[in-house]
Amino acid sequence: MTYRVLAREKKGEEEDENRKSYICSGDGISDSRIGVWRLALSLDITAGVVVTEDVIINAIMYSPPGTDTHHEWLELYNKDTKAINITGWKFYEDGTNHSLTLEQGSMTIPVAGYAIIADNATMFLNEHPECTCTVIDSVFSLRNTEEYIALKNATLDIIDDVTYNVSWGADGNGRTLELNETGGWEESRVDGGTPCKRNSVLEDREAPIVINATATPSTIAVNTENITLHVDVADKDICDINNVTIDLSPIGKSQDTVMSIVGCCTRDNLMWYQFEHETSASVTGTFNLTVNATDICDNYNNTVNITLTVISESITFDTGPGTYPSIRGTHNGTIILNQTMEVHRIYTYPCFKTDGHSEYVAFYNNSGTSEEIANGTWIGTYLGSYQWITFDKSFTLKADVTYNYTIRTGCYPQIHHTHALDTGNGIITCTEFIDANSRVYNDWIPAIKLE
């Protein structure tokens, strides 16, 4: 650590009122004029000791792959408890105090903030467009074997320095040298280093975040239908997501199946990646499939499961597509199936080039109490197909039993303009349809499919 003190020099018994600034280190006091002035063994300190700017050299790209020129840079980090203005500071290299010219940001580095000194700031920003910290241009050429470099303030006091060596790593392989937690230097764990971010060699305890683990549809028939498995994954630290796998061994597939990135977005100051995998199943039952998200620092999260049900056969009730005219409203009617089926979800046929869908559906026993059997609500596109409503729990509709239904549609569903419709799987009727304009009909049946 470097300190500045204000000292008054003594000549014999008399005090010289001229004050001089000295730099104190752990070994004592040094001054370029020490050959001119004979210092007393003791100094009368007239000002308190002040800690100078605690800005450190944090990372070094000294040997980039290919041509070094215009691709070398180093990163500064402000460890101080206050913002530090580095206007007028110098980068010392090869016996020269190189000037610093601001290219991006501010010459004031915030607390825990970063600044980049590049031998070509424009080229650096082209190669690292994600960097939003201070970027400074300078003129230097770092040696690929070993070199002493230093950061100096406006009065050329050494703020930080290091003599790096090729034996530390990062020799032309695209990595950087990074300062670790003990003050030593290591090769970065990621290609290109981590400019403007926390060093990759620092301990990273944050496991990836995994949310929105879904299966669409949540129930499929064994061997004949596919399911899309989906998760959203993010990492809080600098260690980007490496890969996401899912254990499909319970359904007869690979234990470490790799999920693919299908999109990304920024939310809550985090970069979220959407991963999906489509598969079938060769085993029946209800399964919890474990997702394992791993980042480039080998932190992992394997605490999230995707639940799905695989049934022995796929029994559906399908009215088939309908026709126009169409309008949103509430349908009430009855349904009788000719075979017993387990219902997991309902599909609404949309009119051509529209977002036609149902917003709410419920089934009731056709009895005096009209007891509700199940209901479901539309949740939009982000967790599945736009036209599907998936029930929280599957339910059974028995063959040759009359059930009542209520379906509230959104805009432009397809319609069967008849009072009763025989689908081949059963019969569905319209008791009453009230459209958005409060008009009442008894011959509007929604075009739907139950699975």
Image (cartoon, helix red, strand yellow):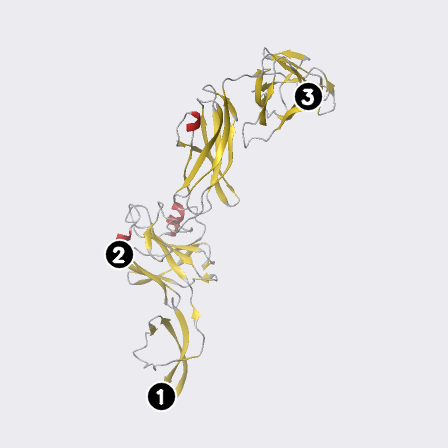
State which quarter of the image contains the C terminus: top right
Q: Is mark 1 on a helix, strand or loop?
A: loop
Tell me: residue 287, above or below residue 5.
Answer: above
Residue under numbered circle 1: 12
Nearer mark to the viewer, of 3 and 2: 3
Q: Where is residue 319 in the image (x, y as percent from the top left)?
A: 60, 15
Residue under numbered circle 2: 146
Whether residue 150 can be seen here:
no
Nearer mark to the viewer, of 3 and 1: 3
Tell me: residue 205, above or below residue 87.
Answer: above
Whether residue 306 can be seen here:
yes
Residues at circles 2 and 1 in contact by the CB criterion of under 8 Å: no
Quick one: label 3 or label 2, which is nearer the N terminus?
Answer: 2
Work out how far the residue at label 2 is from the one at label 1, CA to CA, in angstroms: 47 Å
Badge 2: how crowded within 10 Å, few (<14), some, or many (20+)? some
Identified at 26% across, 56% down, the residue is 146
In the image, 301 versus 40, the foreground residue is 301
| Quarter residue 11 falls in | bottom left
State which quarter of the image contains the N terminus: bottom left
